[in-house]
Amino acid sequence: MDVQRLEERYLKINKIYSIIVGMWPNQKRKTIPRIFVELIGILGHITQGSNIILFFSLRVAMDQIPFLIVATLLIIKYNNFIINEQKFKELFISILNDWQKKKTHEEVMILEKYADKSLFFILIYVVNAYFCAILFLILPLTPILLDIFIPLNESRPRVQMYPAYYYIENEADYYYPILIFSIVSLLTAMCVFIATDTTLVYIVQHACGLLALAGYRFRNSLNDLYSSKKDSKIDEKICRRLCYAIETHKRALAYLTEIEDFYSINIFAQVGASILCLTITMMKIATITWSMETNQYYGYVIAQVVHIFFLTAQGQFVIDSHDNIYWDMYEPYWYNMQYKIQAMFVLILRRNLNPPLLTAGGLMQLNLNTFAEVVKTSVSYFTVLKSV
């Protein structure tokens, strides 16, 4: 599959949002979008941080911290790609090279299966991101639209999308410029999150596809060649097939190492920030009564849980794919083969006892147990804060 077809079929969403924020590997004009994103991130920290510092109270902190964490994650995610741009480009080039290598129809179908799987998860993530963005947009736009279609004798009170301090004495006079800035900040954060996280989903699923490809080659290494009799020619063909499968397996493990090197610290910061953000958001929900203005917090909790799930689930996909290789090794009748062939299979099985892992900073394995622990920890912190 050539580069253009691959991008159009599987990387279209990633490409669109990555180009918007200046992250696409082959993008020529990156300076302007990068300056714009960095400026939005810096202004977000200044306006939100100032609100906490100048008007500090427990209520103000609870209102502000969840949104300040989003601005912090935006900077972390974005600058991780900027700083490690060459590593990201190498990951991208590796994907193209893997697709262009000669493969059988069945092997191509394996890679396409995992590429389709990644596209499915990417669509879910994008829908969740837009759902969260719409909930935040509804809050300030509702009174404006109601004044147009159902006018009253006086204008309805204007509401800001999120709390912040803009160094203006009367913010009501500058409501629309502030609203435009808030909308631009929201859409910028959404684009950065989609661009970075959907890229993670795709490259992890590609690594899982390489592992599945290795398992397929191990499983079919004895096809049409099985014989309990000594035959040097057959043994030589089997060894060549095994070596080919081993190379594929090593390639998958090396690619996973590159992913770990690129994302490890980034994911660690995201998981830590997500625990704090989810805890405070749940605390906020527990202290307010339901209304149109509080809908964004409920949607915000859903978006955070989905975000944590997508981060941790990638490691589980890798573990499951590697476990499948272990079982694929048992399908051929290798235990009835000559001792040389048996020894190779035993060594490969021994290697598969140590699966590759995606971690958060090397301190926390990414899997569904971690997802449960993160949510459990957030709820525990929320319970403690509520009791205090």
Image (tube, rainbow, N blue to C red):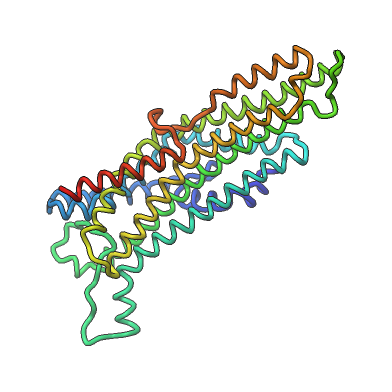
Q: Is residue 362 above or below residue 24?
A: above
Position of 334 with respect to 27 (left or right) is right
Residue reaching furthest to the front:
336
Picture quarter containing residue 72?
Answer: top left
Tell me the residue at 84%/18% (across/down): 228
Query: x and y percent of residue 205 in the render?
Result: 57, 41
Point out residue 189 in the picture as x, y percentages from the top left corner.
38, 52
Q: Which residue does the image show at 17% across and 49% down from the upper left?
A: 387
Observer-nearest of 18 and 239: 239
Q: Nearer the viewer, residue 194 or 128?
A: 128
Q: Is residue 121 left or right of residue 212?
A: left
Name the one closer to the observer, 6 or 219: 219
Q: Residue furthest bottom?
A: 153
Q: Residue at x 63, y 52 (%)?
A: 8
In the rendering, at what x and y percent does residue 21 appear? Answer: 44, 49
Tell how many labels.
0
Residue 369 in picture, x, y percent from top left: 43, 38
**Location of the N terminus (image quadrant):** top right
| Residue 59 sits in quarter | bottom left
Side (left or right) of 40 relative to 23:
left
**In the image, residue 367 above or below residue 6:** above
Residue displayed at 55% across by 33% down: 90
